[in-house]
Amino acid sequence: MAYLELKNVCKSYGEGKNKTEVLTNINLKIEEGEFVAIVGFTGSGKTTLVNLLAGLIEPDSGEILFKGQPISGTSHERGIIFQNYSLLPWLSVYENIAMAVRAVFKDWTSKQVDEQVRSFIEKVNLTHAINKKPKELSGGMRQRVAVARALAMKPELILMDEPLGALDALTRGNLQEEILSIWSEDKRTALLITNDVDEGVFMADRVIPLRPGPKATLGPEFNINIDRPRNKIALNHNDNFKTLRNGIIEYLMQIGKERTAGIELPNYELPDLVPMKFD
Amino acid sequence: MKTKIIKAVKFMGLGYLEPLIRLITGEEVRKNSKDAFKRILFPLLSVVVFILLWHSFSNYLNNVESTLKIEKTLKNQGPEAAKKLEDCIASGDISCRPNSLPSPAMVATALGKLWDDHKIMATKKQDFIDKYETINEERAANGEIEIVYTGRPSFVDQIKTSLKTVFAGFLLSIIIAVPLGIVLGLSDTLRTSFNWLIQILKPVSPVVWLLLVSMIVKTVLTDVDVEKSFVISFISVGLCSMWATLVNTSVGVSSVDKDFMNVAKVLQLGTIKKIFKIILPSSFPMIFTGLRITLSVAWMVLIAIELLAQSPGLGSFVWEEFQNGSSDSNSKIIVAMFVIGIIGFMLDRIMMIFQKLLTFTD
């Protein structure tokens, strides 16, 4: 029995004529302690998939099993890092994380909560900004807070919805390494959704492309058999990394082409006009 | 130190003082003197221009009024009386001053008079209190009613009464509108069911509210000791002005960012916690905007309501001055107008500071 299992999951929005099938027949098995990345184009239904797993929305048909039990609603066992940080702007960095910790560990003393919050703020290197409000932070710092908030809740499964999508390349690289180092401490199961193939290959044990929606479904999986800890610079010269990356990119390019090829453009009749001559 | 002062000044909405502060501390003299010149001198110039325009307009109106008066006297009482009146007007005597828009100088004099009057009334009141202090103590000991001062209220007393009424009304509207707005905001069904009532009651004139409230208060409060007119006017002010807060609160509560609601779901907060930790803080900016509108509406309708309810305050001051028609009544009315305007402006500024202190900005 897999740790997390999706069986023929379908999700659509709207009804009748306006119905759009976002996800169809999603089948996925994740083992405990695995780091899986799902790579796909924007608008291919990635966020819908994460929301389904988090329990924010329910599938139309199919089953989502977590530790053998069908999931219903949200749970503290499944932590989520949102794409747009979703920090509460009226709370400081400390308060944002403390609120989450208090919500999960209801019987903790305030000292335990304080220790947990401070240790996670330190892990994401934000001790200097502990009392700042989100608006005073840069995008990368905000995302760090969101990461610390999700991980401080000690979830058994971490869902990451394009966590680094809005960041510049340098900050992205740093944060990838930070997330990996925190993750490697206790190797919890993680699911990363991303549009960056390099990110997926660098971070995950398995990369699965999501064929673009509507009617998105998962493509063939790529096993990333590169030893951890991985070094970004060294990876650039790793042949294994190169083949995997190129393989995924080629696959994505091909399904991209298929998608545009399937759409028939209307044939416009252009008027036959010739510039007028004045002489 | 300097940056702290500048921050505080900006916080109070007095940002135009920034270049002056920087100039005093000798920072970037050329740039800051230019800025200070622009941001302080020009507004001051506009005040001068305003007073000059006002002065010449009132002069013009007074001339028109005097010519009309003289022509009328000439027609009705003959040339001799007309000549007499013309001389009288030219001498600037109070008894024959044309009754029109007062000039800035006259308004300034009226302000001085009102202030002197206030000082006289205040000493009178103090004398009275000193005089009756011992007597009242004896009366209280004997179980008799104390003798209270019942003299005429001065202009400053009227301002105080008005502020008291407006705050009582404002408090009432907060007590009613904020909880009600939260309830309506949380439930789509309730909001759509009661929307018609809000939409109909919102545009009702303060005068009608006053009449409605007095109908009810008259029956409910039969106790003579209570100041009925005060109760009527503050309840009317509250009912009249609470709509902005009610609507803003319900809209703010109902339109909380979906991301924040997702956070609440993921953290699995209970209903009460969700309301107090997520929904209320995120709708605070909207609620405060509503409260600011409510306070300025309350101050605006207060004058009309006091005027009609015969409740003491600036409204009745204006009305009495209009009724008694003495030579400086018009000037006093203009003084009241500026005082009302400035107090309204200050109330709004105070609310703005509270809003900045208590709410977040993106």
Image (spheres, coloured by chain):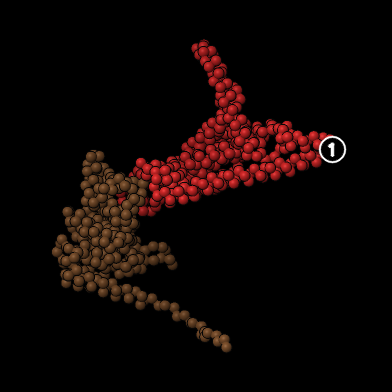
Chain colours: A brown, B red
Q: Which residue does the numbered mark 1 point to in the structure image?
A: B79
Query: Residue B185: percent from the left, percent from the top?
Result: 45, 47
Q: Quadrant of the C terminus of chain A?
A: bottom right
At which x and y percent is residue A14?
A: 41, 63
Query: Which residue occupies the foreground of this view, A10 or A149?
Result: A149
The correct choice, above or below, for A147 with respect to B168 in the image is: below
Identify which residue is drawn at 53% across, 38% down.
B343
Return the residue nearer the eye: B15 or A103.
B15
Viewer-nearest residue: A240 or B334 = B334
Q: Residue at x 21, y 62 (%)?
A: A203
* Residue A168 at least partly seen: yes
Q: Quadrant of the N terminus of chain A?
A: bottom left
Which residue sits at x=22%, y=68%? Answer: A221
Image height of A43 relative to B292, above or below: below
Q: Position of residue A194 (x, y in %)?
A: 28, 63
Which residue is farthest left? A227
Q: Could you say which quadrant of the image residue A32 lies in?
A: bottom left
Left or right placement of residue A106 versus residue B322 in this view: left
Residue A25 picture quarter: bottom left
Q: Report the residue at 25% width, 39% height from top.
A: A110
Give amino acid for label 1. Pro
